[in-house]
Image: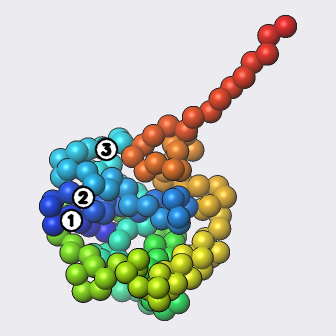
Amino acid sequence: MGAKLYFAGHLVQLAGIVVGVRGALAHANWDFSAKREGYLARAVHPGNFSAVTGACQMVRRDVYERVEGCDEKFAVGFNDADFCLRVWGYRTIFTPYAELHHYEFTSRSREEASEEKLRRWKREQALFMQHWLEFFLTGDPWLGPNLSSECVYGALKITVLVLACC
């Protein structure tokens, strides 16, 4: 189970994670106001996601131990989503009822601030995409087949149908 996290300005930072989109992962309902409901009210009601953030994640101890915890190959990034996918079969739930302010990057700078950090992030991103290739080929099952994998706000896929009339 994962919480709803806010930036310092009280805009949503994390409210579920969508896998297989926009460079590996995307934070659903990102930058929303606290009350904005989003697609199918997924930002304000508990619901299934493929992953939730490790910044505030709750899991039963026996489940954590069964998969031997987080994979240390993901030193900083992608470890939370990788963990959620490795325990697939259990429900991964986002809840808006656990709310916290998350001051990300205050204890460490952004990856873009350092060539070394950026290389590590890209290495972890490539490893994540390699491990979970099916999400990039078939899409996140909790996103829905008719929604765009480029937009995590519930945008419909645009399909162009050309009919030839004789």
Q: Position of residue 6 (x, y in %)?
A: 21, 64
Q: Position of residue 145 (x, y in %)?
A: 57, 44
Residue identified by numbered label 2:
12
Would you call the spot at circle 2 few (<14 residues within 10 Å), some (14-19), or many (20 or more)?
many
Q: Which residue appears at 41% of the width and 85% of the height?
A: 114
Would you call the spot at circle 3 few (<14 residues within 10 Å), some (14-19), or many (20 or more)?
some
Q: Residue furthest left?
A: 9
Amino acid at circle 2: Val
Q: Which residue appears at 54% of the width and 54% of the height?
A: 141
Residue identified by numbered label 1:
7
Q: Which residue appears at 47% of the width and 81% of the height?
A: 118
Q: From this viewpoint, is residue 75 visible?
A: yes
| C-alpha span from label 3 to label 2 | 11 Å
Amino acid at circle 1: Phe
From the viewer's side, name the closer residue of 58 and 4.
Answer: 4
Q: Position of residue 52 (x, y in %)?
A: 37, 68
Does the CB distance between marks 2 and 1 fall below 8 Å? yes
Residue identified by numbered label 3:
38
From the viewer's side, name the closer residue of 28 and 87.
Answer: 28
